[in-house]
Image: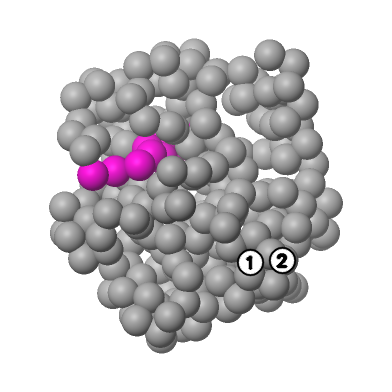
Amino acid sequence: MSMRNKLDISSYLVIGPENIKGHSVAEVIKKAVDAGFTCVQIRSKVASALELINLTAEAARVIAELGKSASVTLLVDDRLDVVLAVKEMGVKVDGIHVGQTDIPVSVCRKYLGEDSIIGLSARTHDLIDYVKNADISQIDYFGAGPLHETSTKPDCGMDAEGKVLTRSFDELTELAKISPLPVVVGGGVKLPDIPELAKTGVAGYFVVTAVTEAEDPYIAASDLVKAWKAERLEK
């Protein structure tokens, strides 16, 4: 069965070598997946193509060693070349996440085929209208945010005038209702945000430093997963 048919973006880790403190990327991924994270995205604006290829292959190996290759999605941010290279090496990578100014979704779908997952960051300044009217025929989920301003991506949520627009829980509730695709929300998300975020009806949350820079990434990841599941189970 294609990963597109069982995509779970409820607990989504975004990670690169610039986001870790005292850990390795592989170590953090292992702890997060072991704690119950369901999706991992390799993202770096400083790593070379070869470094990203190696990181992605290492992430796939870690996920496989935990016996979760069939349930945990592995994506790469922006870099179609990296995804194609890793696939050519025989490594299981499930797809790509792109933004509005990255390589077009149609090109990604052409080269990655029908079984690959493609996520798209929804526009910030006209988010609701965009999600209502976007061509969703070739994508699998929307990424939205930021919930808060975030140092890992300072331009996240920036509008045409350079102002950072954060998202309220009310906006996210509306977004979840009108979106034809699952929505994952991030941007400065921390543990105290999870109960309220889960109530909005979005499909999940994505985090970077809440796990990658935690003193114990396993405990941090586990706490996030438990908080999300606890709120969803109450419904």
Left/right placement of residue 214 relative to residue 93 reads right
Please tell me which residue is depicted at 46% across the width and 26% down the height of the picture. Answer: 167
Q: Seen in the image, is 80 located left or right of residue 204? A: left
> Residue at position x 72%, y 31% from top?
229
Task: Report the residue at 69% width, 64% height from top.
Answer: 67
Label 1–label 2 contact, CB within 8 A: yes
User: Helix or strand or loop: what does disc 2 sit on?
Assistant: loop
Q: In which quarter of the image is residue 233?
A: top right
For the point 33% across and 61% down, which residue is it?
A: 78
Indicate which disc residue 66 carries: 2
* Front position in the image: 220 or 75: 75
- At label 1, which amino acid type do we have? Ile
Q: What stretch is highlighted in magenta?
A: 138-147
User: Could you give the CA–CA distance between mark 1 and mark 2, rounded to whole angstroms?
Assistant: 5 Å
Q: Is residue 15 above or below residue 71?
A: below
**Residue 11 drawn above or below residue 176:** below
Q: Name the residue under label 1.
A: 63
- Please state the horizontal and vertical placement of residue 37, each as a whole percent of the image: 66, 50
